[in-house]
Every structure is written in C-alpha cells, then in structure tokens.
Image: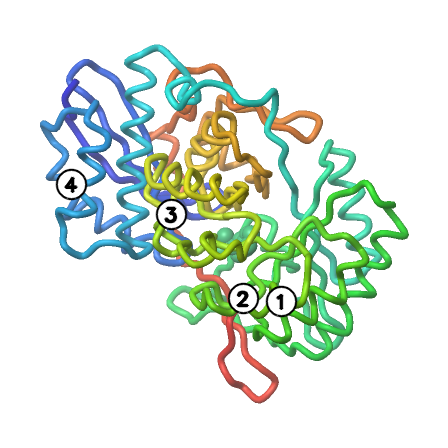
C-alpha cells in the first residue's frame, strides 16, 4: 500500500480547518487534521510545500517509521506547526491502516476498554443566571459534566463567553484587521468565582461534574488561592491555571490545594509533560491528537501519564476538526487511563464537509464501527467554504499591558 497523492485542503465550514487527504495505489483515502487555530495557513504550507512531496511512494503501513522520519529527519523538531503537520500524516496513516484491515481504529489500538466515552460540554453566560440556563440546556442534551465560563463583572463578556465562542471563530471586524481585544483583571475574577460555584452547586446539587478553564491567566500564587477558594464546591478540575510552559509553577499550586488540575492543550510532545508527570503535579493531560503528533504522539504521552495515575482529557474544541475529534474517540475507547473527553460541538455546516462515524448519546460518545477513524472528508463540499481570516482575541490588563488570553 503506497501513498499516491497527498493533498492539503483549507476550508471554513463554520470555522477554519486544515485537512490532509492521502490516497493510496490500492484506492483507499485516509484523512488527518492539522488545524492550528489562527495559524492555519502556516501549517498548510508546511504540509503542502515540505511534507507532501516526501510522502509520495512511501509505504502507507509504515506509521512509526514515517512519524520518526518527519520528527527526527527534519532536524527542527517539536513546536505546534511541525507537530500538527506530523499529526495529520499520522492520523491519515492510521485511518488507512484501519481501512486496509477492515477494522475500526480502536481495534488496532488494543480494542475496547470501556462501554462509552464520557464527554463534557461547554456552558457559558454573561451572568450567573444565563450560565445556569446554559448548564440546563447541556443537561437536556445528556451531559453529566460541564465546563462553566462566566463574564467577570466590569470586564466585558470575557473568555469563552461571547456568541462566537460557541463555534470558536473570532473574525476581525474587517479583512486584514487585528484580532479583537478583551480586558482581564485577576482581582474581580478571583472574588467572583467562589460566588459562581456556590450558585451552581445550589442550582444543580453535588452530582454534576463542574469544570472550569482559567486559560493561563493567573500567577502561581493567584492560582493557588483560586484552588483553595473553590475546593469546597468540589470542582471536577481547574484547567490551565497558569501559563503551561512554566511547569515548575504547578509545584506551588499543589502545595496549597487538592483541587484536581488539568493542563496541556497547547503542549505538542511528551517532553512538555516530563516535570508535571514525574512530580505528580497534574491529574489530567489535555493534548489533542491534532496538536501532539497524532495517534502515535498522543498515545506516547498518555502511556507515560498512566504510570503516574494521570488520566486523559483530550482537547476537543471546535477548532479541532471532526477528524481530530473522531481519531481521539478511538484512543479514548482503547486506553486504560481514560478520564473525560471535551466536546464543544461543531455547527451544522461543519458536517456538510465532514461525515462522521461517531455518535453522542446520554452524555457519552461511541467511536463507531467504520474502518479507520470513521470520519470522511468531502473535498467538493469543502470548496464551498473558503478560508476566512480569524484569530483568537488578545487579552490586556486594565493599564493596557498584553496578558495571556
Ligand atoms: O480556547 O481551542 O479547553 N478548551 C479551550 C479551547 C481553546 C481553543 C484555542 O484554540 O481552552 O476552547
Ligand atoms: Co482549555
């Protein structure tokens, strides 16, 4: 089974996606996701100009060899663009191997370890009342775990709350313009969050799993304070409390709180986790198939996590395509140390281009029984949705200093 063509498609059915389409000499089509939110064209060029020509004629079964060839063979290893490009190739090759074997991907990864894959949804509101309504709506869809994001009084809508956050597409006001800007101030945020959690526990009782994402905005000591102040409300986890590249910061946070910690959605390799894992500083590893070198890269991360009793929580926002999510679900089904899967929910137009084999019911996913990862990509339909310039917002402190968004 030799790779015959490698095509890169950037499309925007609801938001931007970068898709790699591999065909083989025996007529199979495998697809991988390489979407890097806000830097889509960089990874498309990396794949199209530098990777695709190397793939033609290669043995499509040689997944590990191809992974190492693209990782070690280029000298410039790691980083989000490189690892997303490798991820797309790796995911497409696993898709092909599954199709060649006539087996769903989870079977190639060791078979099923669980009956369903529990997922958490995104709830948000500009007020606590609106947030409560949003949680109710997710419960009606079957979710038993929700991520809650709420505006901080006096700071505008804020992270994860505006309407666009639903689909993750933040278009500038006009083409060529800079990203939107938002305000951040840790003081009112830290005072507000215990009240929010108190209202949520009053409204929903003790059973609901409540998650919250801080998006790298706090200093280590502020993060420690937040953990302490929310502990009595039993959060499922607090995510990305401090900038994740500062792994040592988690030592300080851990000294002060027993709240479970999640991090890693911006990590690309196992090396990003070494301190966090070996010192038992987090409880959930958040990397995506799409950003951490595909099934091969993420499996390596999660296996190392497992020996430290750290669980998976694969990143599943709408800026990961249904291919990246679909591939993740097979890993979720197969690994022993599954924790939870994020499910932000794509808009309907996304499914005009991506035909998914997975299903979601009663708060749980099934990866589906189609061969490979089971997500198919309609190249013709993709042409109806050209790339749109879109960036995440930039965050500033009240005095104008650039902060982490
Ligand atoms: O803001 O994927 O946990 N999920 C998240 C996401 C991220 C986006 C960034 O591209 O933090 O919603
Ligand atoms: Co996050």
Write down the residue under mark 3: 291
Viewer-proximal residue among 213 and 124: 213
Label 2 close to label 1 by CB (< 8 Å): yes
> Secondary structure beneath disc 1?
helix
In three-dimensional space, the C-alpha distance between marks 2 and 1, rounded to whole angstroms, equals 6 Å
Write down the residue under mark 2: 251
Mark 2 within 8 Å of ligand 2, using the beta carbon: no
- Nearest-to-viewer mark from 3 and 4: 4
How dense is the environment of label 1, judged by Cα within 10 Å: few (below 14), some, or many (20 and up)? few
Q: Quadrant of residue 77?
A: bottom left
Residue 248 x/y as whole percent:
47, 68
Q: Residue drawn 59% across and 72% down?
A: 218
How dense is the environment of label 2, judged by Cα within 10 Å: few (below 14), some, or many (20 and up)? some
Write down the residue under mark 4: 69
Q: Residue drawn 13% across and 47% down?
A: 73
Q: Is residue 283 left or right of residue 187?
A: left
Label 2 close to label 3 by CB (< 8 Å): no
Q: Residue placed farthest to the right in the image? A: 202
Which mark is first along the chain, 1 or 3?
A: 1
> Secondary structure beneath disc 2?
helix
Residue 256 x/y as whole percent:
67, 67
How dense is the environment of label 3, judged by Cα within 10 Å: few (below 14), some, or many (20 and up)? many
Write down the residue under mark 1: 255
């Amino acid at each position: 089974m030799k790779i015959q063509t490698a095509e890169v498609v950037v499309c925007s059915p609801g938001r931007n996606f970068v898709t790699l389409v591999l065909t083989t000499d025996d007529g199979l089509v495998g697809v991988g996701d390489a979407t890097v939110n806000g830097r889509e064209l960089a990874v498309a060029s990396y794949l199209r100009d530098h990777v695709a020509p190397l793939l033609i004629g290669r043995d499509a079964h040689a997944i590990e060899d191809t992974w190492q060839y693209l990782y070690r063979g280029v000298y410039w290893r790691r980083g989000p663009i490189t690892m997303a490009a490798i991820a797309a190739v790796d995911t497409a090759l696993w898709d092909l191997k599954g199709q060649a074997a006539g087996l769903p991907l989870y079977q190639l990864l060791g078979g099923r370890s669980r009956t369903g894959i529990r997922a958490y949804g995104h709830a948000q509101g500009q007020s606590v009342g609106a947030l409560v309504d949003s949680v109710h709506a997710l419960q009606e869809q079957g979710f038993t775990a929700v991520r809650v994001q709420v505006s901080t009084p006096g700071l505008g809508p804020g992270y994860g709350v505006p309407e666009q956050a639903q689909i993750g597409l933040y278009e500038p006001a006009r083409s060529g313009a800079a990203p939107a800007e938002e305000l951040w101030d840790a003081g009112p945020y830290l005072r507000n969050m215990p009240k929010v959690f108190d209202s949520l526990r009053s409204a929903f009782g003790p059973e609901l799993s409540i998650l919250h994402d801080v998006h790298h905005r706090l200093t280590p000591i502020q993060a420690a304070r937040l953990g302490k102040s929310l502990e009595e409300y039993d959060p499922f986890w607090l995510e990305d409390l401090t900038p994740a590249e500062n792994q040592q910061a988690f030592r300080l946070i851990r000294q002060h709180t027993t709240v479970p910690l999640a991090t890693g959605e911006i990590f690309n390799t196992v090396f990003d986790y070494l301190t966090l894992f070996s010192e038992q500083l987090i409880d959930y590893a958040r990397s995506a198939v799409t950003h951490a070198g595909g099934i091969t890269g993420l499996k390596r991360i999660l296996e190392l996590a497992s020996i430290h009793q750290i669980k998976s929580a694969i990143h599943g926002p709408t800026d990961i395509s249904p291919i990246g999510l679909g591939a993740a679900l097979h890993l979720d089904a197969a690994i022993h140390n599954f924790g939870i899967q994020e499910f932000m929910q794509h808009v309907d137009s996304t499914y005009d281009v991506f035909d998914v084999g997975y299903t979601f019911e009663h708060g749980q996913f099934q990866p589906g029984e189609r061969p490979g990862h089971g997500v198919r990509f309609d190249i013709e339909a993709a042409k109806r949705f050209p790339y749109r310039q879109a960036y995440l917002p930039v965050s500033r402190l009240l005095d104008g200093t650039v902060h982490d968004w």
